Image (spheres, rainbow, N blue to C red):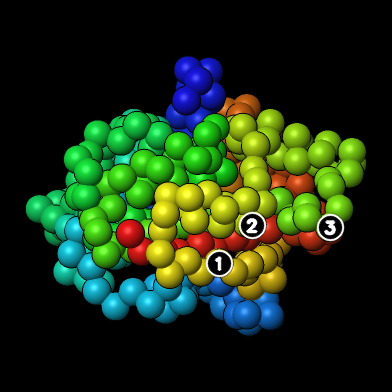
Amino acid sequence: MSATLYQQIQQFYDASSGLWEQIWGEHMHHGYYGADGTQKKDRRQAQIDLIEELLNWAGVQAADNILDVGCGIGGSSLYLAQKFNAKATGITLSPVQAARATERAIEANLSLRTQFQVANAQSMPFADDSFDLVWSLESGEHMPDKTKFLQECYRVLKPGGKLIMVTWCHRPTDESPLTPDEEKHLQDIYRVYCLPYVISLPEYEAIAHQLPLHNIRTTDWSTAVAPFWNVVIDSAFTPQAFWGLLNAGWTTIQGALSLGLMRRGYQRGLIRFGLLCGNK
């Protein structure tokens, strides 16, 4: 991972994570609003529902040792550790996030079973065959080498273990290439959210076959999660969020002002919410 991109991602999440937790809570990912995206629900419940729907979709009923790649402030890690009475390790590029996740583990009486550290997902500090569940929820879009990222997830996964990866994608391009306007839209998103690039779900599936993962499944939940951005936009225009944005600094303000980029991306079918799972 290039030093510049590494620093950009770190600084973005160092600056914005506190405000996100203040407004939204511990889960830094999309919510699930039913398969057709029409269910009305509390925004935090929608995020918890996404975790549960993912586990159901991937057929995960138990786990002993979990790795959360791109753990944020520990939302998924702590939820999964508690649900499965498991050990959980979370990695992030943000020291602020790792420290807050550690604090939250103590508050939840889970510090003996969880640990959080700053680490690069493309060069993880773990032995081969370490985890029976590798969980990556909306971090793949930040990876500058998608193949290396999935190879690392595969390397640390135990034989028979399961990888669940959920990530932002662009639409498949097998029938028509991205248009110049679509490319510009993506570049605007990359610049605001510190992304090197995204790829399509079929491209991720091709990488998964090369690893090789077994029992590979993929699906697109764009419709189910798209309402999330309307809710985020609404929450950004409150007095609490306004003052928080001023304190968080320019990169966070820029991210808030650009929320419509993601909403429009979903509306036009350019941005996709891709799921992939498989076993080693």
Q: Nearer the viewer, residue 15 or 167?
A: 167
Measuring from the top left, give residue 255's x and y in whole percent: 65, 38
Which residue is rendered at x = 61% and y = 32% of the image? 196
- Measured Cα–Cα span from mark 3 to mark 2: 12 Å
- Local secondary structure at mark 3: loop
Which residue is rendered at x = 42% and y = 79% of the image? 56
- Residues at discs 1 and 2 in contact (Cβ within 8 Å): yes
Q: Residues within 10 Å of mark 1 (few under 14, many from 20)?
A: some
Mark 1, residue position = 218
Residue 202 in the figure: left or right of residue 71:
right
Mark 2, residue position = 202
- Local secondary structure at mark 2: helix
Measuring from the top left, give residue 230's x and y in whole percent: 70, 61
Q: Nearer the viewer, residue 73 or 242?
A: 73
Query: Can residue 92 be spotted in the picture?
Result: yes
Could you say which quadrant of the image residue 65 lies in? bottom left
Which residue is rendered at x = 69% and y = 71% of the image? 223
Measuring from the top left, give residue 99's x and y in whole percent: 28, 37
Mark 3, residue position = 175
- Measured Cα–Cα span from mark 1 to mark 2: 8 Å
